[in-house]
Amino acid sequence: MRDYTGFIREYASGAPRLDCARRGVYPGSVNALEGGVVFMADEGEEDVLVCTHPGLFAGQERGGLTVAPLNHGSADVLRRLFPFAKPAPVLSRDATCGVGDRLGIASPGHIRAFEASDVSPVLAQQSMRELKLTNRSFADVIDAATFSVFRAGYRGGFGADGDHLKTPEDIFLALETGCSMITLDCSDHIRREAPDARGIYGGAIAFAKRIYDEFFAAGGYAAELEISIDETDAPTSPEQHRFIARELLSRGVKFATLAPRFCGEFQKGIDYIGGLAQFEREIEIHAGIAREHGYKLSIHSGSDKFSVFPIIAKHVQGRFHLKTAGTSWLEAMRVVAETDPALYRACHAKALASFGEAKQYYHVTTNLGNVPPLETLSDGALPALFEDPDARQLIHITYGFILGDGTLRARLYALWRRERRAYSDTLFAHIGRHLALIAGKPLRG
Ligand code: ZN
């Protein structure tokens, strides 16, 4: 347990340079509060909030200060005191990117990448599938983002996405919990077998209209709507995209972004598969349709699509929403392979054992025959697995099973806590590469 009285004395005396590092205080988190101060500190195994005002946070009284844990109650207090720590609608900004943080520990690295770019973040972003597989709630996900933003002192604003929601019940829950955007997944209402576009998309358009009227038309929530029609087998042709946009807008459905299913394959966590010439022809038209109708193109399954980012950048001209999620989980596992080979081997074995079941949840074409048996690899060769598409997908889609194993989960979180600087550095580089390519400009600094 640390003693913060020296730090607070120094703060109160108006010292020009506070010695944060020696006292475990996160420098960006130091905020004045009615003649006092509140900040976050690193107590080794966990972070805590420290506040000079008694009774504001529920925690332990220590030498006239409150030392509070990072729980839901503390997150609520932070959001009330500091509006920058609360999710806000950001999709109306030109360049935005969602970076799902399935583990609740990725935001520090994400924030560093966004700070070095002109892209605005949607830090909290989870689908029901992800919530179920990681055993988390919307509140957990938003709280983790709130704490990270406060810790870093990031004041640029961030979004929270109830991602790929399909039912009014889930949408209500996400909005009530504070999500600042909903991604409405219309895929269950698309009739692929119908003879024309009207028949294919009529149900999806009616569904979107119903959800818009129920939750968005009255403006009761500070939230934006994304329409997603990407989770289907067949690509959305530019003609179909135009039809859907016109039908929705003519019915008064206002939406900030729309995610078509592009040609080729946007599989999880690996680069684009398919012809680049056709992709470029079509993305140019898709981007034009979005521009013409006043919304942004949303690019889903955007993790690691390095070969097409420059093409997308060329045609969206700085206005886009990109979604990534699994890649930040993969980078967390890369850190495990680099720093604890024995633990990585145990996770890999779990992934192999659960791959068959995990495949029901995700569309991938993984060939496990291409993943070398781990007993043939030295410890030093393990990180290179993360350069291999088949090994990436194996680990990518089995996260729920790896994290669902209580022993592995505890060991993993302990390691990620220990290696938090390494994970932050890895994510800064990796997400930074995404942002630089799709925005078409290098990171600052
Ligand atoms: Zn999608």
Image (cartoon, grey):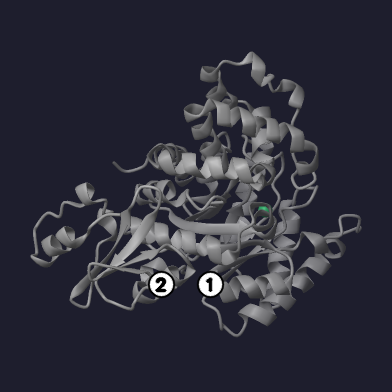
**In the drawing, does residue 206 fall left or right of residue 386?**
right
Q: Residues within 10 Å of mark 2 (few under 14, many from 20)?
A: some
Measure how far apart labels 1 and 2 are at the Cα level: 11 Å
Q: Amino acid at mark 2?
A: Arg
Q: Residue at x 66, y 71 (%)?
A: 171
* Residue 223 sits in quarter: bottom right
Q: Please say whether residue 207 is visible from this viewpoint.
A: yes
Q: Please say whether residue 154 is visible from this viewpoint.
A: no
* Residue 362 sits in quarter: top right
Q: Is residue 362 above or below residue 273?
A: below
Q: Position of residue 5 (x, y in %)?
A: 18, 62
Q: Position of residue 133 (x, y in %)?
A: 68, 52
User: Which residue carries the number 2 mark?
Assistant: 79
Q: Are marks 1 and 2 in contact (CB under 8 Å)?
A: yes
**In the drawing, does residue 319 fall left or right of residue 60?**
right
Q: Is residue 271 above or below residue 326?
A: above
* Residue 57 sits in quarter: bottom left
Q: Secondary structure at mark 2?
A: helix
User: Which residue carries the number 1 mark?
Assistant: 178
Q: Nearer the viewer, residue 302 or 243?
A: 302
Q: Amino acid at mark 1?
A: Gly
